[in-house]
Image (cartoon, helix red, strand yellow):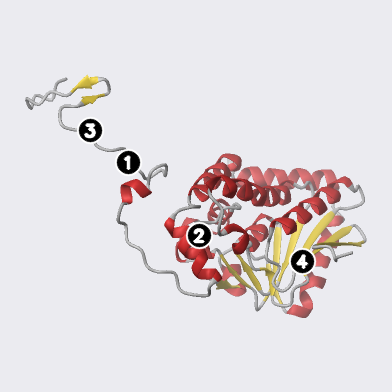
Amino acid sequence: MSEPLVRAERRGPTLLLTIDHPPVNVLSRPVLDALLGQLDEAEKDPAVRVVVLASAAAKAFAAGADIREMSSMGPAEARIHGARGQEVTRRIERLPMPVIAAVHGVCLGGGCEIALACDFVIATVDAQFGQPEINLGVTPGWGGSQRLPRRIGVARARRWILTGRSVGAAQAQSEGWIDRVVTREELLPAALELATELAGKPPLALAAAKYEVLRAADPRLDDALAYELDLWARLFGTKDQREGMRAFLEKKKAPEQDRSGWAERSAGFPWGRPASPAPGAPVGGKRKRNDGSGRD
């Protein structure tokens, strides 16, 4: 039998879930499904009080979604795949117990979005965080565009998402969403120590506190995630997405693009505008006068 993509190990009242998809824990559909299954099992087990999410890969927590898997998707397929990614992050967020991310190495794209959904993030000094989707002709689609501004503020989130640049653990901590930075040797012990502390709290009150804070952060997150998913899925099949992902897979720089045919390319997006009516054409069911009177 093949090794599980997400290993589960009990450490007293803590469930340690370790993503094990070498070499860099690319978040393929099977990995997402395995993670969902383990999270479901965690909630069913009354003895589990805290979940720690870690990585078996030497160089990464998770390097992001599987670009090869997504590169040929159209909008309909992308919507289904994006919904699966959002289901994982929403499941982490709604689990009635704390979830701690123990992050080392690369934590980009979907990996960063999974960490964002966790209640606590402990990271090593070599950890790198980022939302580089813009370089692939798409945007964050698993909650990153919604959770990151709520965590670090709009101005900083805009810089992360619009530039696609990565930041180190120290900067991520200074911007407000890494709880603690430690050495690689200290990472798992630090995460388990925090888990033990949390597991000592009354479980019902702990779940209520988690949900209260979640509601305070954004009571309409479901609507926001639906908006993100809609825009993310619409980008699939566009020239930006096709060329961006092809360049990534071929390890080349994506060609620069201009805004030619912008009106047609913007159809269906919120910044798209309907074509202007011809002079004298009916406006709102009436014909506009051209006598300068301003009256209909």
Residue type at mark 4: give it: Ala
**In front: mark 2 or mark 1?**
1
Q: Residue at x 68, y 47 (%)?
A: 87
Q: CA distance from mark 2 to mark 4?
A: 24 Å
CA neighbours of label 1 inside 10 A, class few (<14), some (14 to 19), many (20+): few
Of labels 1 and 4, earlier in sequence is 4
**Coordinates of residue 129 in the picture (x, y in percent):** 60, 68
Circle 3: element type: loop
- Find out whether the residues at labels 2 and 1 contact each other: C-beta distance under 8 Å: no
Marks 1/4: CA distance? 45 Å
Disc with the residue nearer the chain's start (2 vs 1): 2
Identify the mark at residue 277; answer none if there is no mark.
3
Q: Earlier in the sequence, mark 3 or mark 2?
A: 2
> In the picture provided, is 31 more to the left or to the right than 74?
right
Q: Are marks 1 and 4 in contact (CB under 8 Å)?
A: no
- The mark nearer the N terminus, 4 or 3, is 4
Residue 62 in which image quadrant: bottom right
Q: Quadrant of the N terminus?
A: bottom right
Counting other residues with Cα less than 10 Å from the Cα at mark 4, is it few (<14), some (14-19), or many (20 or more)? many
**Marks 1, 4: nearer the viewer:** 1
Q: Amino acid at mark 2?
A: Ala
What amino acid does circle 3 point to? Pro
Q: Look at the numbered disc 1 and give the secondary structure of its residue.
A: loop
Q: Is residue 123 left or right of residue 264?
A: right
Q: How far is mark 4 from mark 3, CA to CA?
A: 57 Å
Q: Is residue 137 visible?
A: no
Nearest the viewer among 271 and 72 is 72
Mark earlier in primary sequence (2, 4): 4
Q: Where does the C terminus fall, quadrant-wise?
A: top left
Residue to which mark 4 is pinned: 54
Residue 277 visible, this orientation: yes
